[in-house]
Image (cartoon, rainbow, N blue to C red):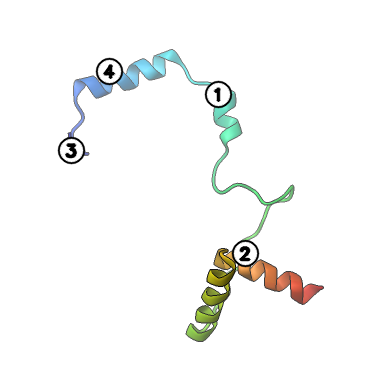
Amino acid sequence: MREDEIDEAQIQAWADEAEAGYDVEALRRRGRGRPGRGAEPMQVVAVRLSADEIEALDAIATRDQVSRSEAIRRALAQFAA
């Protein structure tokens, strides 16, 4: 079946699923977006970096096997200490 084709069997399966009902509490627990890192909401901060800075950041992140964001958080923690 192509993604732009929906047959009667698929429609019936969706209808059966909806009629059976959903566990609303389970859906609420699942939440949206990325999981939180703590009790307080996080903020996104945009930072402009040069190509050389990104290369250095990526090298550190690869070396430590972490994401760019985690590498930046670790650097900030060391800077603030």
Residue at (51%, 78%) from the top-left corner? 54
Residue located 54% across and 29% down the image: 27
Task: Please indicate whether residue 7 sits to the left or right of residue 19 in the image.
Answer: left
| Disc number lying in front (3 or 1) | 3
- Dot 2: what SS? helix
Vertical order, 25 against 45 (above or below): above
Q: Give whichever of discs 3 and 1 has the lower sequence position.
A: 3
Q: Earlier in the sequence, mark 1 or mark 4?
A: 4
Vertical side of 68 occupied by 6: above or below: above
**Dot 4 and dot 2 residues touching (CB under 8 Å):** no
Q: Position of residue 58 (x, y in %)?
A: 52, 74
Label 4 to label 2: alpha-carbon separation: 45 Å
**In this picture, residue 80 sits left or right of residue 25:** right
Q: Earlier in the sequence, mark 4 or mark 2?
A: 4
For the residue carrying disc 4, how many other residues have a C-alpha within 10 Å: few (<14), some (14-19), or many (20+)?
few
Q: Which residue is mark 1?
A: 24
